[in-house]
Image: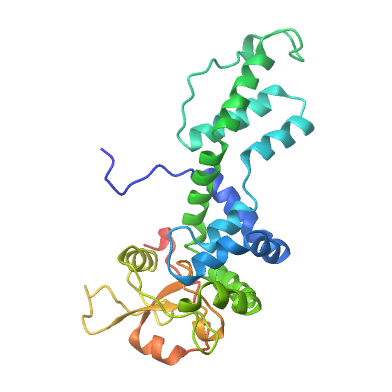
Amino acid sequence: MVAPKDEHLALSSGIGLAGLAIGYFGEFGLGAFETFREEIIEVLLKPNKTTAVHWYLSYFQDVSEEIHKIKGNVDELDYLFNFISNTLDEVNLKPDLIRPDFENCSDKWHEECSCNEIVEQWVKYVSKNAEMINELIIHSAFQVIFLDRKFLHDFHLELSDFVESYIDEIREAYPENVTVKGRIKRTHFPKWLTDAVFYRDKGTCSICRCDLSKLIRTQNTIHIDHIVPLDIYGSNDASNFQLLCETCNTSKGARSTATSSINVPFWNL
């Protein structure tokens, strides 16, 4: 039985999207921020489960466009169908459609058989459910990217330039969320966020690696820290946080973006 908080994740598709988005961030990051300017500004003000990273990922994810490209560049119908079938399987969608029998089809180019017509039904099914498919793949890709504090650091450092550029627009639209100094105001951290950050960072300070689980040392105090501080145009976006101990959080200060990419490889356990 699946536990209430467990989900089916499209990890293969998600990892592919995450790799693409990370690899092209330097080239397309700012363009994506501008494309989704209003949506991103809204999620910078207070933690939301749809983050700026989600909107950045959506800049690359379009299953209908991927199918269109395959149809234009590949003559093999079975390649197109396999892509569709694998994608739908990844997102746990099971259409009640006939599958083409390529193995027993004697029409090499599928000009007079029923294969083309059958595959087209699958294409239409994807088009009809494209929004849901894209959301599920983006959701899965975020689970991968959220593990990468180094990328999140670079992402939010770039995003801080975006915030600085639009701070007057943000102040005009959301005056209650901007300080007199012209920075985004600190906000309440919901439990789902603090739990997620604690779980990702394995109850360990991201910088000094001391135990914050209270299973070994009970005196260390947990701090949820902005990776890119609000003082240098950081935000309350839910992907801009890390777990620190009180000592590291105090020494990090209001202008440091210190973090760490250290983790424990599975084989080292």
Residue 173 lies left or right of residue 66; in this view the side is left
Q: How is the image coloured?
A: rainbow
Residue 56 percent location from the top left of the image: 60, 58
Residue 175 percent location from the top left of the image: 50, 78
Q: Nearer the viewer, residue 85 or 55?
A: 55
Q: Quadrant of residue 8?
A: top left
Residue 25 percent location from the top left of the image: 66, 63
Q: Nearer the viewer, residue 210 or 66?
A: 66
The total number of labels drawn is 0
Q: Nearer the viewer, residue 180 or 266?
A: 180
- Which residue is at a point 59% across and 69% down the rendered structure image? 155
Name above or below for residue 75 compared with residue 179.
Answer: above
- Which residue is at a point 54% across and 69% down the rendered structure image? 152
Residue 169 percent location from the top left of the image: 61, 74
Residue 58 lies left or right of residue 217; in this view the side is right
Quarter of the image for the C terminus: give it. Answer: bottom left
Name above or below for residue 128 compared with residue 23.
Answer: above
Quarter of the image for the N terminus: give it. Answer: top left
